[in-house]
Image (cartoon, helix red, strand yellow):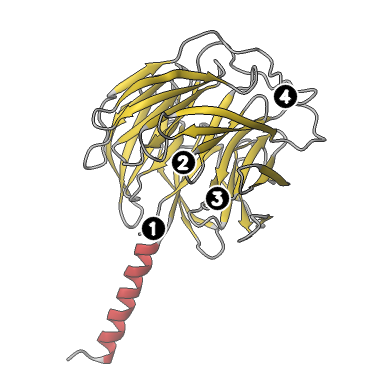
Amino acid sequence: MLSARHLLVASFSLLATAASAQTQFAWVGTYNPNGEGLYRFTVDPGTGDLRDKTLVSQLPNAAQLTVSHDGKTLYAASEVEKGVVQAWRIAPNGELTALNQVSSGGAGPVYLSLTPGGRHLLVANYVSGTIAVLPVKEDGSLGEASDTRQDSGPAGAGKPEAAVEGSFAISDHNGPHAHMIAADPQGKFVFSTDLGLDRIYQYRLDEATGRLTPNDPPFIAASSKGAGPRHFVFTPKGDGLWLINEEASTLTHYRLDVAKGTLTEGKTVSSLPKEYKGTSFAAGLALSPDGKQLYVANRLHNSIAHFTVSADGQLVRQDDVWTRGDYPRTLTLDSKGGWLYAMNQRSDNITRFRVAPHTGKLTFEPGYTAVGSPSQMVISPTP
């Protein structure tokens, strides 16, 4: 028969094990030299605070990340001339074990995403203007590319026609520059943006082989000349997406034909407040889990534009919130939509905002997380 002391020790051991199992980890990719590689944090569920900062990899310019749907595997792209993607197994205590490293299928990989079924990792390579499909093996490691595609065509307009007065947001309209790639929620179609060519490419995905087939049409033009299409998020129903245009600082809605896998352009709005004049580069965007709140990062203006999505899909501007940092590259919402984080690249910090449950209103939570040149943060899902 166990004594009271033994029962107490056993109870504490079970509680410690349960607490460890529920620990949520945030992974932050950075740019050298200010950032030294890939960092791990623990996330305080009550305050959203990022704690226990640990450098877990010195992979050069490990700026682009994604985590598997079960939270057991982490992938990071090294944004260098001969791009590579590294895969790690995540232990329950957050320790990483390297699985393997493969070519990204091009130069300067700037975006990673997993297909809904988790069988393929999609890569956009900015410098070379190529996209690639990497098979995901049973253990989470990666195979060599099952398909690569090279964007080609005339460069987009040198000056964004839809930018605000006084804007000099002009960059890289000198050839192909793939900026993002992702599959639709069904996993049947793949879309990629090319900032340099002002195009959104449309593909059909063969889930069995990991091969891409150009759709009809194979691409559509950006919403305006020189707009510089960058990142996008799908609606929860998967019947459309919101796309941010970097150079024009505009946000465009596209309807998605879920049977054909083709996009139709809808309404475009500015990501900047109407009184703003001058240069700004729109960057990351995040959609709340219920699809009712949309947040956009504006670099140079250093703000987060907050929109609510009405029942008919229209955007209603609610607020423009100062990030408390410089050059917000990406935004990250936690899985419950209660906290939003801004990666402030030039001020070398991460700031966080409490998200009001019903209105989506952002409130800055005093305190900063020091990280050199943060690019992206992903949060591992909890069991």
Q: Position of residue 119 (x, y in %)?
A: 28, 37
Residue 288 - label: 3
* Residue lying at 67% horizontally and 46% vertically, measured from the top left: 306
In the structure shown, which secondary structural element does the residue marked by tag 1 occupy? Answer: loop
Give, as a three-letter code, the residue at label 2. Answer: Gly
185 to 5, vertically: above or below: above
Which quadrant: the C terminus?
A: bottom left
Report if the CB atoms under discs 4 and 3 are less than 8 Å apart.
no
Residue 163 - label: 4
Q: CA distance from mark 3 to mark 2?
A: 14 Å
Residue 207 - label: none
Q: CA distance from mark 4 to mark 3?
A: 27 Å
Marks 1 and 2, the one that precedes in the sequence: 2
Q: CA distance from mark 1 to mark 4?
A: 41 Å
Give, as a three-letter code, the residue at label 1. Answer: Thr
Marks 2 and 4, the one that precedes in the sequence: 4
Marks 3 and 2, the one that precedes in the sequence: 2
334 to 128, vertically: above or below: below
Q: Position of residue 302 (x, y in %)?
A: 70, 39
Q: Position of residue 95 (x, y in %)?
A: 33, 51
